[in-house]
Amino acid sequence: MKKYEQQYYFLRVADDERIPSVSADDDTSDKNYDFEEFPIGSPPFMFFNAGREYNEKNGIPLLKNVPAILFDGTNLLVPGSMREVLLELNIPHLHMHPSVYIHDDGQWHEDYWYMTFVERLDCWSREKSDYEDEIQPIRLGGFEFFLVYKFCFDEELLNSMPQSERLLFKMGGALNALIVCHESILDIFKLGDVHGIKFIKVEDY
């Protein structure tokens, strides 16, 4: 049986400087949109490319085809087709809110859904992982967050959980709070024009 570090992947933005550096507008930024669930019917989150001026100054060409998946930090905006598939999996603590991305050319892309994890899964081993332990961790909301350089999973914890409850989650206890995906559902994030994402096996991080 493969180790857990071989079964899971981090979802990261692809290495392409043309990919939008997505940022929320002022109204969305005023909300705790990245860790709270918002009721059905509330206004969509609004995003734009914060790297537009930098790209223009440095001659980086406009990316005409907006990727199907966009990144706001480590969080994802996914199209409606992916949302429908994810809903069928009943991913714990995952909520998706309608969102709009306004591209550099002024075009509104209104089929995005922002993925919010209202709880994180702290499942990395303090004994086996490589992390910054010589300075005090950052403490927020009663939780401690470490800078982790190399992740190794807490096997006992994951063994105690059904796989269906750990298919997709946001890493807890780490400043680099990455989204983690099990290999069995990785193909969901490969549907359509997904040139904006890369998949890094946890073992290779």
Image (spheres, rainbow, N blue to C red):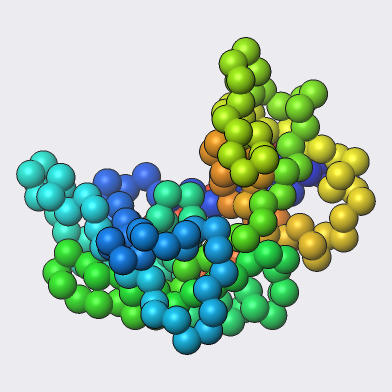
Placement of 136 over or under 141, stated as above or below: above
Residue at 59% from the left image edge and 39% from the top image edge = 140
Q: Residue at x 15, y 45 (%)?
A: 54
Answer above or below: position of 158 versus 190. Answer: above
Is residue 176 in sight in this rendering? yes
Residue 41 pos. (x, y %)? 47, 86
Provide residue 136's location: percent of width, then percent of height: 61, 20
Judge left or right: residue 172 versus residue 27.
right
Q: Look at 54% across and 52% down and name the residue there.
A: 11
Residue depicted at x 79% and y 23%:
127
Q: Nearer the viewer, residue 41 or 92?
A: 41
Instruction: Give the side of residue 47 with respect to residue 127, left or right.
Output: left
* Residue 205 in view in this figure: no
- Res. 162 image quadrant: bottom right
> In this figure, what is the number of numbered marks?
0
Q: Is 9 placed above or below 167 here?
A: above
The x and y percentages for residue 80 are 48, 80
Q: Which residue lies furthest to the top in this view?
A: 134
